[in-house]
Image (spheres, coloured by chain):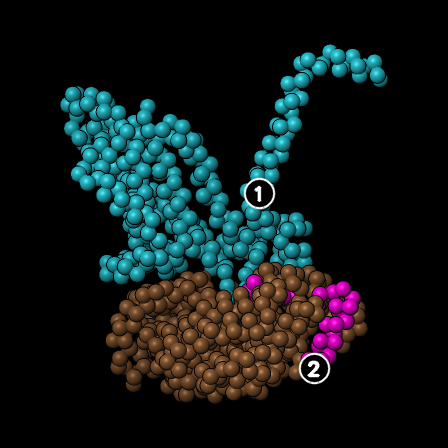
Amino acid sequence: MTVTATRASRTRTPEKAPLRERHPARFIILVLLLVLLLLIVAPLLVVAINAVKSPADYAANGPLALPHHLYFQGIVDFWNRVDFGLKLWNSFITSIVVAVLAVILSVFNAYALGIGRVKGRIWFLVFFLIANLLPQEVLVYPLYYLSKQLGLYDSLWSVIIIFTVIQSAFGTYLLTSVYTEFPKELLEAAAIDGAGKWRALWRVVVPVSRPTLAVLFTFFFIWTWNEFFLPLIFLISNDNQTVPVALGVLQGDRMMDATTTSASALIGIIPAMLFFLIFQRTLTRGIAAGAIK
Amino acid sequence: MTISRRGLLAGALGLTTAAALAACGDDDASSTEGADAKTLTLWHYEGPTSAMGIAWNKAIEIFKQKHPGVEVKFEEKSFEQIQQNAQMILNSDSAPDILEYNKGNATAGLLSKQGLLTDLSDEATKRGWDSKLSGSLQTTAKYDDDGIMGSGKFFGVPNYGEYVMVYYNKAMFDKYKIAVPTTLDEFTAAMDTFVKNKVTPLAVGGAEYPAQQIFYELALSKADRAFVDDYELYKNKVDFNGPVLSYGAQTFAEWVSKGYIAKDSAGIKAEDMGVAWEQGKFPILISGSWWYGRFAKEIKDFEWGTFLFPGNKLHPGSSGNLWVVPEKSKAKALAYDFIDITMSPEIQNLLGNNGGVPVVADPSAITDAKNKELIENFNKLTTGDGLAFYPDWPAPGYYDVMVAGVQGLINGSKTPQAFLDEIAKPYNENLADLGK
């Protein structure tokens, strides 16, 4: 034993020293990362555990125990109770239309403000920033009266229009600062080749900033998907409601139904997570690439 | 409770004027108005498996049989959505023809004041709803011109009631050979026995409504109807240092110091309190009838029972939420017919058989022994005029004042005197706002 031990220490010490130095630190970082991961995933896990637990099981063993058997009735019941397929479709249509329109609107605005250098553009930007910072509660009554006047109350269009404007206010703000850094050479080259402003926008500016636009698109989609307050107010009929509003059905006056609520939360976040996973690549690429190629 | 969750936004004034115009006229025509409508849009926010959900589904079926040409458009709404938006919805063309709505000054009272709800007084006398509802149940159905409950016109009709009682774990009572207490002294003696055996007797949720209801229950043990009228309906000034409320505060603090109520329960939510009791961690839970159906369904591991808070004539409780008919309803006559069906013995007994507390129940028609006990206790309360409403009703935002105050009593950061001073201030400010 001793022989092998001394021999081993003699032969391995020189090459193992740096490894051993790094090892504890790496280990600590790994543990820290795992703890952090657990902290982030824990609420999701609790939701997932309770989503597949029967109410009696929940009552007997509490929220943190593992389910005795898988119980999917909560999810099925909730799906049928609120006609969840329809809600998914409403949310999808609203989010996708808002994301597309808001990106287009942001591009137009930012082209004028960032590249076109419109007079007083700083004030425009301040205006957009303020519009962005306004709490939605302030907007409720004016928007309510406007939408009633236009016959858009209780219609998906009211929400689409409102969020297109809200999201594009942020988009304009962000894209403008990107476009002010836009390389002039490219624009000058385009102008020499005979491109007008319209052509330069579509043939030069948009293709070059496509990664940034993809990021905006993804954010707009997810933000709109998660919106609760304004849809709650503007989408009255059950046929028009979006996913987050439908989830609210389970929150009673005094009672809450923990297992069904978890079931609904689970199927409520899955679409947004899927969307994020699909577009994750564009997100990282967009951020890494920056605006200028 | 319902009042406290009111998220009503500022800017309501604009609606008042618009609605006042709409509210004028059409007194005589109201009983036949909309009788020829082809659809009845109906909203409520009770789960499909709750007692109300089951009973009202049946009521819709019966309504369809009686009105073959009428389509019933039922939508289950979220409590949150109705709570936040009722004003805006009822002032628009998207208003339903009939809906479930919260009772109370800040909800049904406010809407009635703004002219958004139909006066149901004529229908109530014609169809006999007023004689079916006992005095303390009518309190939350009637609102005066200022939207304050207790007198004036009928603006809603409740189908069910609710009251606070004592739930107890029979297995744990048997283990320590404790009989069901009939007086407050016996009750405290029972809790002493538990404390001696290192069991915390009361499951309490201090972060939400349950703790303040225990405080109110204790105060009510020294109160009479006149006190309740003063406190809830502003008949006379309330002395917060008088015998009733100071007894409630002091006894509550005593219960904490004697260990009946755990010090850490200040941060417990109602849901966690219920689950802890369901798991048999505490022998006693003082809370409302809204738990009843759930306990009956979910508790499999032990026997349990209920009794009214020993010695009290008055108990926290009230009518449940109301059926209201919006002023903009296009099928008012049909809505009245629907309300009438929900008040019929068939629907009322169905409510009772599913663990609800019907307002006009016939206990002999209730088959389940447990449900029968629940309803008999409620009938005992209503015939003795024993519903004393809830401690947080009198002023807007009072719920949070109560929660914070009682939390202070639980964790010992406030003396009973400081607690009483704290809750007196917003109460009296509200009185001043009302001009009383």
Task: List x then y, in percent, for residue B35.
Answer: 33, 77
Tell me, yes or no, whether dots 2 and 1 are on the same chain: no
> Residue under mark 2: which chain is it in?
B
- Residues B348 and B248: in front is B248
Residue positioned 44% across, 62% down in the render: B80
Mark 1 residue crowding within 10 angstroms, few (<14) / some (14–19) / many (20+):
few
Residue on which disc 1 sits: A39
Q: Is residue B191 magenta?
A: yes
Which colour is chain A painted? Answer: cyan
Element type at mark 1: helix
Residue positioned 33% across, 52% down in the render: A134
Quadrant of the image occupied by residue B269: bottom right
- Identity, as a three-letter code, of the amino acid under mark 1: Leu
- Looking at the image, residue B169 sits to the left or right of residue A123; the answer is right
Residue positioned 67% across, 22% down in the render: A20
Task: List x then y, in percent, for residue B48.
Answer: 51, 64
- Identity, as a three-letter code, of the amino acid under mark 2: Thr
State which quarter of the image contains the C terminus of chain A.
top left
- Looking at the image, residue A285 sits to the left or right of residue B161; the answer is left
Residue on which disc 2 sits: B183
- Looking at the image, residue B290 sits to the left or right of residue A96; the answer is right
Element type at mark 2: loop
Residue positioned 80% across, 16% down in the render: A5
What residue range appears in magenta? Answer: B184-210
Query: Quick check: B46 above or below B130?
Result: above
Could you tell me how far apart the alpha carbons at marks 2 and 1 are, in whole angstroms? 49 Å
- Residues B371 and B119: in front is B119
